[in-house]
Image (cartoon, grey):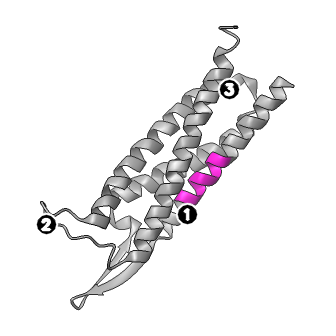
Amino acid sequence: MAKTKRIIITILLRLLAFGATLSATVVMVTSHESAEVMNIKFSAKYSNSPTFEFYVTAEAIATGYGLIVLFLSSRRSVDRLIVILDVVIALILTSSISAALAVAQIGKKGDTHAGWLPVCNQVPKFCDHVTGALIAGFVAAIVYLVLNLYSLHVFLTPLFPV
């Protein structure tokens, strides 16, 4: 019974992580909007920023990894490798979210010291998409953190019985 419960919890967490990374990727890739400011037309899309491209790449890697691991999670022989890769994916997600959040903050608030004006007033739909993608990315990172803690609990409990 305990093994079945462990497998169900792990699969549910992995499905949640997969859904969050997939939504973050799709929402960010579909974020684009055009605006005209002082008769100059410009387009805002994720591919304009290397940081957002890194974010999409990290989320896509996590999505692919999550799909593969869903099929391998029942195999006992790769459990330790999966735990290590879960930590790596969590770190990649955290770094990409941090970078994308910094760029999004500048886009929303601007930087008066550098003379950068906020752009979210001109392209609100784009900024809303980016915000949604970042929220989904945060959810994915938190789920991977919980998954890592749960995996450590499963591995360490037999070593240190109470």
Give the farthest residue toward the front: 162
Residue at x 50%, y 38% (from the top left corner): 90
The part of the chain drawn in magenta is 16-24
The foreground one among 58 and 90 is 90
**Which residue lies under the disc numbered 3?**
78
Mark whose residue sits in front, 1 or 2: 2
Q: CA distance from mark 3 to mark 1?
A: 29 Å
Residue 20 forms part of the magenta stretch: yes
| Residue 22, x across and y down, in percent | 59, 56
In this image, 120 relative to 85: left or right?
A: left
In this image, 122 relative to 89: left or right?
A: left
Q: Please, what is the dominant secondary structure of the magenta stretch? A: helix
Mark sitting earlier along the chain (2/3)? 3
Mark whose residue sits in front, 2 or 3: 2
Q: Quadrant of the rendered structure where residue 74 is?
A: top right
Q: Quadrant of the rendered structure where residue 77 is?
A: top right
Residue 132 forms part of the magenta stretch: no
| Residue 138, x across and y down, in percent | 50, 49
Q: Is residue 13 above or below residue 149?
A: below
The circle on residue 115 is 2
Q: CA distance from mark 2 to mark 3?
A: 52 Å
Q: Secondary structure at mark 3?
A: helix
Q: Secondary structure at mark 1?
A: helix
Tag 3: amino acid? Val
Q: Secondary structure at mark 2?
A: loop
- Quarter of the image containing the C terminus? top right
Q: Is residue 44 above or below residue 132?
A: below
Tag 2: amino acid? Gly
Tag 1: amino acid? Val
Q: Residues within 10 Å of mark 3 (few under 14, many from 20)?
A: few
**Which residue lies under the disc numbered 1?**
26
